[in-house]
Amino acid sequence: MHTADHWENVYLSKSFDTVSWYAPHLAESLRLIEQLCPSKAAAVVDIGGGESTLVDDLLNREYLDVSVLDISGTAIEFTKRRLGTKAGAVGWHVGDVTTYDFGAKRFDLWHDRAVFHFLTHLAARQAYVDRLRRFVKPGGFVLMATFGPSGPLKCSGLDVVRYDGQKLQQEFGEDFELLGSELSLHHTPSGTDQQFLYSWWRVSPEKAEL
Ligand SMILES: C[S@@+](CC[C@H](N)C(=O)[O-])C[C@H]1O[C@@H](n2cnc3c(N)ncnc32)[C@H](O)[C@@H]1O
């Protein structure tokens, strides 16, 4: 099945709080975003934001330049409805991160929880890293949450790749400096635990614009 169809089916058939990745708030993500980008003027994008409440929490913390991309239009519409009038303050994008064109927009921080690890083909990962190089400002930050070395082998019925910092460094290349990482257990709604690796990166200030 095509990736977009897979995710549309997920969001059409399941409620937001029953999917395995559901958490009422993305606490680690929020804490790290505030540490890396304390300025409320920072341009922050949530890649594969789905129906998560990260965008709500960023707006509540008065971040002024928040964008969300997801391959599922259904998920984006759900999140917009939940936000009501606040949705107008957000840059909404529906598309595949590996091919998406944000135009002239550049981000201070790129957040990805549980999207990159679905890219099982090298070409897709290379295309993703090309997007990072193009759309994150020189000196900007990438905050990734992938499954860790002891994480699940599948999610949502799809194969995933598990990562440690070294393996991610090989994918990202020398323009990305690993600033820190931590392992974290996610408690799924069905009662199991999943190991995530949070890692945060600085994009070289000298990186060439693609
Ligand atoms: C496991 S969910 C995580 C959702 C959210 N980040 C969270 O942590 O609650 C993966 C999300 O990534 C989206 N997604 C999957 N592949 C994608 C792609 N190639 N481009 C953009 N979004 C994608 C899915 O629609 C889904 O919302």
Image (cartoon, rainbow, N blue to C red):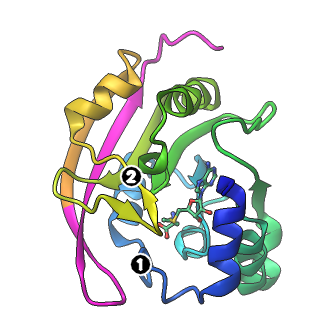
Magenta region: 184-210
Q: Secondary structure at mark 1?
A: loop
- Pick whichever of labels 2 and 1 is earlier in the sequence: 1
- Residue type at mark 2 is Val
Q: Residue at x 37, y 19 (%)?
A: 173
Q: Which mark is residue 113?
A: none
- Residue type at mark 1 is Ser
Label 2, on which residue? 160
Residue 94 point in image, percent of width and height: 77, 56
Q: Residue at x 46, y 46 (%)?
A: 116
- Look at the numbered disc 1 and say if its residue's Cβ is closer than 8 Å to ligand 1: yes
* Above/below status of 145 relative to 155: above
Label 1, on which residue? 20
**Relative to residue 100, is residue 136 drawn left or right?**
left
Q: Residue at x 19, y 53 (%)?
A: 182
Give the quarter the ligand 1 occupies.
Answer: bottom right
Q: Residue at x 60, y 68 (%)?
A: 55
**Relative to residue 17, is residue 145 drawn left or right?**
left
Q: Do labels 2 and 1 touch, CB within 8 Å? A: no
**Relative to residue 167, is residue 43 drawn left or right?**
right
Q: Secondary structure at mark 2?
A: loop
Mark 2 or 1: in front is 2
